[in-house]
């Protein structure tokens, strides 16, 4: 939500000048579904002779049962280990040889693979992705190598980073039944005990055309692109995809608190309230109101947390708010802060709760509401300058079950949010009974050995 003030001005221009908006994003989304269940979305954007191709699978951390947490992320790494036709290393070599970039990322609700190429090279992407969609050659010796990479990745990104460790422990306490309680990278004991048979079963279960969405954005012709995709993907055999068992989060009956002790220079506070997302909000406007509420608190340098807690009261050196309305399952509305010298996490907790109380008791002024809307919309506008982001937005919305059509309604729905709706969701959801609070208590920092260089599997985030 932290945006440059300049962006709000551009957003206002975009809202008042539809022609400029059309120039920035003049392509319609075309959908086609092949007989094997693969869905393709194509959006023409001819501002540069470049194309982005992404394959999204409906599987991620929230799909995993206990004992194999993180297996979606592990399989993402293994997808670069080759097939019979293209052995280990060939995928990346071919893309690089053709001047392209490729990588992948795993989240709680998805796993995605992407390439960015000069427009005439799109066929290369289709050929390679179609091959590894059904023909991955999983070998025990390659898994053994990659286990070391993922273990080191976890150490560097979570175990050795106090805030990340606090956030991981926060999720484990905040959720009791939701699969969001588990880290996407997996728990250490699960990672250590993966077997190649586990990976094969997971791959065969989820990596199929009828569980995937192919998204193409760039300087392409829609008809030719669909025809090309048919050539490579339409002949792939589908799998039987069984619906997931419901995992509704148990109702929380009071505040939950935890303390994490870890080597760190500064203390840290994390707070979160359970809230609905676009998939679950009823009525739907609640999700958009929560999005605007997050912007009021943390929508740039002029937002409340920056002006009041950091520059005003000077009790925080950092403060932020976050909300992800595009998750598959209900999520958390998050607040976080680092205290200034001489202040404690308890001072921050009181201050953040006071900000929540003001949102519950007072209507946001028309001027502030319009400014924050402009900030939120500016973020969306700037991201759409990127073919990659446009593809990612479509793939994400489709994969989590919202539907790609919602991408075009975001601006309209944000603009409809009223001050009364912002206050209503603050009163309904930002309440003590659904609150979880985590405190990071710094411990002495000792000299750590230099980490080994990471090699092997590739991924973006």
Image (cartoon, grey):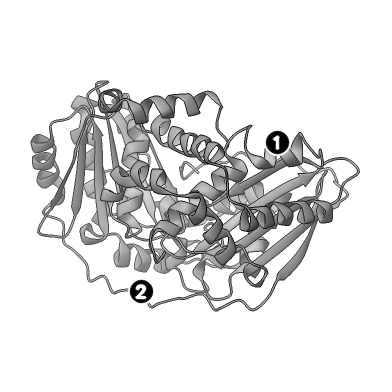
Which image quarter is the N terminus in? top right
Residue sitting at the far top: 48
User: What residue sits 81% from the left and 38% below the top?
Assistant: 314
Residue 3 coordinates in the image, percent (x, y): 55, 32
Density class for disc 1 (Cα within 10 Å; few <14, some 14-19, many ≥20) is: some
Q: Which mark is residue 319?
A: none
Say if 24 sits above or below 109 in the image.
Answer: above
Q: Position of residue 408 (x, y in %)?
A: 29, 43
Q: What is the quadrant of residue 21 in the picture?
A: top left
Between 451 and 174, the one lying in front of the other is: 174
Mark 1, secondary structure of its residue: helix
Q: Is residue 281 left or right of residue 356?
A: left
N-term-proximal mark, 2 vs 1: 2
Residue 142 visible somewhere in the drawing: no
Residue 158 is situated, as x and y percent measured from the top left of the image, at: 65, 52
Name the side, left or right, on which 219 lies relative to 307. Answer: left
Is residue 67 at least partly visible in the picture? yes
Left or right for 359, reference 24: right
Residue highlighted by disc 1: 307
Q: Is residue 30 left or right of residue 343?
A: left
Q: At 61% from the left edge and 67% from the top edge, which residue is drawn?
A: 189
> Considering only vertical position in the picture, is 172 above or below 93?
below
The x, y position of residue 380, in whole percent, is 41, 36
The residue furthest right is 342
Residue at 43%, 47% in the rendered image = 105
The residue identified by callout 2 is 244
Residue at the (53%, 60%) spot, across then down: 425
54 lies above or below 353: above
CA gap, disc 2 and disc 1: 45 Å
User: Tag 2's secondary structure?
Assistant: loop
């Amino acid at each position: 939500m932290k945006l440059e003030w300049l962006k709000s001005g551009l957003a206002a221009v975009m809202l008042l000048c539809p022609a400029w908006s059309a120039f920035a994003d003049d392509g319609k989304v075309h959908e086609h579904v092949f007989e094997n269940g693969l869905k393709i979305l194509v959006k023409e954007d001819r501002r540069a002779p470049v194309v982005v191709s992404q394959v999204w699978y409906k599987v991620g951390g929230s799909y995993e049962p206990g004992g194999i947490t993180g297996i979606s992320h592990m399989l993402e790494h293994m997808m670069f280990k080759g097939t019979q036709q293209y052995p280990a290393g060939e995928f990346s070599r071919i893309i690089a040889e053709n001047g392209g970039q490729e990588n992948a990322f795993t989240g709680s609700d998805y796993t995605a693979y992407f390439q960015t190429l000069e427009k005439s090279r799109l066929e290369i992407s289709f050929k390679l992705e179609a091959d590894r969609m059904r023909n991955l050659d999983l070998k025990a010796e390659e898994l053994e190598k990659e286990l070391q990479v993922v273990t080191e990745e976890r150490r560097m990104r979570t175990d050795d980073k106090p805030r990340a460790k606090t956030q991981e422990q926060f999720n484990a306490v905040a959720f009791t039944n939701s699969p969001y309680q588990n880290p996407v990278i997996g728990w250490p004991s699960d990672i250590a005990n993966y077997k190649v048979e586990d990976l094969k079963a997971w791959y065969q279960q989820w990596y199929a055309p009828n569980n995937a969405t192919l998204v193409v954005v760039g300087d392409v012709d829609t008809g030719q692109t669909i025809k090309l995709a048919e050539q490579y993907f339409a002949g792939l055999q589908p799998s039987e995809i069984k619906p997931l068992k419901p995992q509704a989060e148990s109702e929380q009956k009071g505040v939950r608190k935890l303390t994490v002790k870890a080597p760190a220079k500064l203390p840290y506070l994390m707070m979160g309230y359970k809230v609905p997302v676009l998939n679950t909000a009823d009525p739907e406007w609640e999700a958009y109101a929560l999005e605007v509420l997050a912007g009021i608190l943390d929508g740039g340098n002029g937002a409340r947390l920056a002006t009041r807690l950091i520059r005003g009261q000077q009790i925080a050196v950092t403060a932020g708010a976050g909300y992800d309305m595009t998750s598959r399952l209900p999520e958390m509305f998050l607040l976080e802060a680092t205290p200034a010298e001489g202040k404690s996490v308890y001072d921050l907790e009181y201050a953040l709760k006071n900000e929540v109380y003001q949102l519950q008791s007072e209507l946001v002024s028309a001027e502030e509401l319009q400014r924050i809307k402009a900030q939120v919309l500016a973020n969306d506008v700037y991201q759409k300058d990127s073919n990659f982001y446009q593809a990612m937005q479509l793939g994400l919305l489709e994969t989590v079950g919202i539907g790609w059509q919602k991408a075009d309604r975001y601006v309209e729905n944000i603009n409809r949010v009223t001050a009364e709706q912002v206050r209503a969701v603050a009163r309904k959801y930002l309440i003590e009974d659904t609150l979880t609070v985590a405190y990071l208590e710094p411990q002495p920092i000792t000299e750590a050995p230099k980490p080994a260089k990471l090699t092997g599997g590739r991924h973006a985030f």
